[in-house]
Amino acid sequence: MIELNGRGASDGIAIGKICILKDKGQDVPKYEVENTELEIMRYRTCREAAKNKLQKVYDNALKRVTKKESVIFQAHMMILEDSKFVDLVEAQINEGKNAEYAVYQAGEKLAKLFKSLDDEYFKARYTDIIDAANILLETLQHKDSSADLKKYGEPVIIAADDIMPSDAVTIDRSNVLGFATNKGSQSSHAAILARTMNLPSVIQLDDIPKDCDGKTAIIDGQHGRLIIDPDVNTLALYSAMRDRFTKQQQRLRRQIGLRSETKNGYYIKLTADIGRLDLMESATANDAEGVGLYRSEFLFTNRDKCPDEAEQYETYRTILRHFADKPVVICTANVASGKGVGYLDIPKEKNPSLGFRGIRISLENRDFLRTQLTALLRAGSSGSLSILLPMITSVEEIDYVRRELESVKNKLQLRGNDYCNDIRLGAMIETPAASIMADVISEKVDFITIDTDTLIQYTLAMDKDNPKLEDFYRPRHPAIMRLLTYTAERALRNGIPVSICGGLASDTTMTKFFIDIGISELILPPSKILAIKAVVRESLAEPELRKHYSAIV
């Protein structure tokens, strides 16, 4: 039995055979060719076939993920047509190398060049180059990697070094039990795909044995484990855990349609926290009462130019139309240095977390802010939209945005565009400074959202993703509890509703505390909504404790 530990990217337990998803760049044939002209013709014919395949992948992606995430495959096609890539391939073939080896070498050379660059956007293109080259390699070798998933005649656990973008949108859910990868992050293609498919996933395993193909394995998505060749006792233990998890999910499904209120009638709204359009279906399926936070920065990052008004408008309108009459809160771009927004010319910073980010960038780049506000106001006519401002630390920042909103409304009126005239404006509380100023800030806005992740980071002065700080990281530190209570109390005095997002919103041990201090909304990952609703419905609200908490503050 082999047990590997990584990071859980999607909850659940899967038991089944492992299918190693081979790197398309592995086992590339290398041989000398005599007729180089004929080999170049073969390469060019297969390049056109690969582009046609990528067009189909793009069309399929549009049905499953956002346009921004789909457009990556158009970039793949451009890579195959790029003069540098083509010249590198054909130069190798003219030297007598076969097309497969020439494509592999060209892809590796270009990818390494991009990976060595300082610009985050170009670094991120490393995977795209490898993926595009691999699809061409498959075409040259007449291979179909998806056939591997069907070789055992049953759904399998996919194990790989990493999941390429093209794999992420072409894998058929009916063939898959879960994912295990050596690389990846919470925002990697494997993690996103697993959460979208509602399948368990473990990432960052480092060293999945290459000889485990076909062996029985267990994925524990909650604890980040991959167990290969489990013994009888371990298999029995995890089989029972899987059955319990399945039954628990079935019990949670019974919460759908029920009102999110305590036994004694206190209601708290449960909405979705999303950053990608592919999570909209999951939010709806899990009974979200709208979108409490759409993180629009995902629309702006890892691209070479800023999305224009038309693209932003279409994205925001898509969300609002999907949720019809339910409320949708869209946060303006919370971008920062090193986040793949080179087109904003943000200087490199030693500590981006404490630097030029969030609302500060929007205020400095007036056209950038105006374009987003214009798209938001136009889209607002399609539903119930509120705008949230990130990283607010002073009322002057809110005043500035309100003036810009009025200016944008005037422009839209002159243009003859439909727009939302009565839009709610909120402030995100992320720092102790903003929390302490909650009484003043709440006089300037229509609602307040507390991001517990960043509030904890700035209050405790520690990064939750730093493994060395794991023993020191205390989300329920007394200082955090006091700031949460203080912020809620000051806002409620002014009649302003307060919502909670971030990790603590999903913490079932915090749910009753939030109800008792007067929080009106919890903003949750779609997969957590039903679990929190179950806790709410089993709770007894004690609003009289609010005075007790306030006294402690």
Image: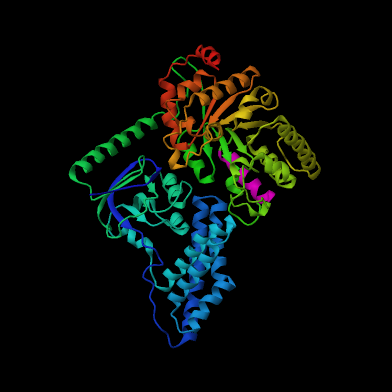
**Rendering coords of residue 442 (x, y %):** 66, 24
Q: Magenta stretch?
A: 307-322
- 527 to the left or right of 115: left
In this picture, residue 540 sits left or right of residue 420: left
Front residue of this view, candidates 458 and 31: 458
Horizontally, residue 192 falls left or right of residue 214, namely right
Q: Is residue 382 left or right of residue 35?
A: right
The residue positioned 81% from the left and 43% from the top of the image is: 414
Q: Is residue 58 above or below residue 471?
A: below
The mark total stands at 0
- Asked whether residue 109 is drawn in magenta, I would say no
Overall secondary structure of the magenta stretch? helix
Most extreme residue toward the bottom is: 34
Q: Residue at x 41, y 47 (%)?
A: 194
Q: Position of residue 40 (x, y in %)?
A: 49, 81
Position above or below: 242 against 48: above
Q: Is residue 545 above or below residue 373?
A: above
| Residue 410: % across, % down | 80, 39
Q: Residue furthest left?
A: 232
Give residue 212's position: percent from left, percent from top. Answer: 27, 57
Using the image as rendered, state which of residue 466 and residue 490 is in the foreground. Answer: 466
Residue 317 part of the magenta-drawn span? yes
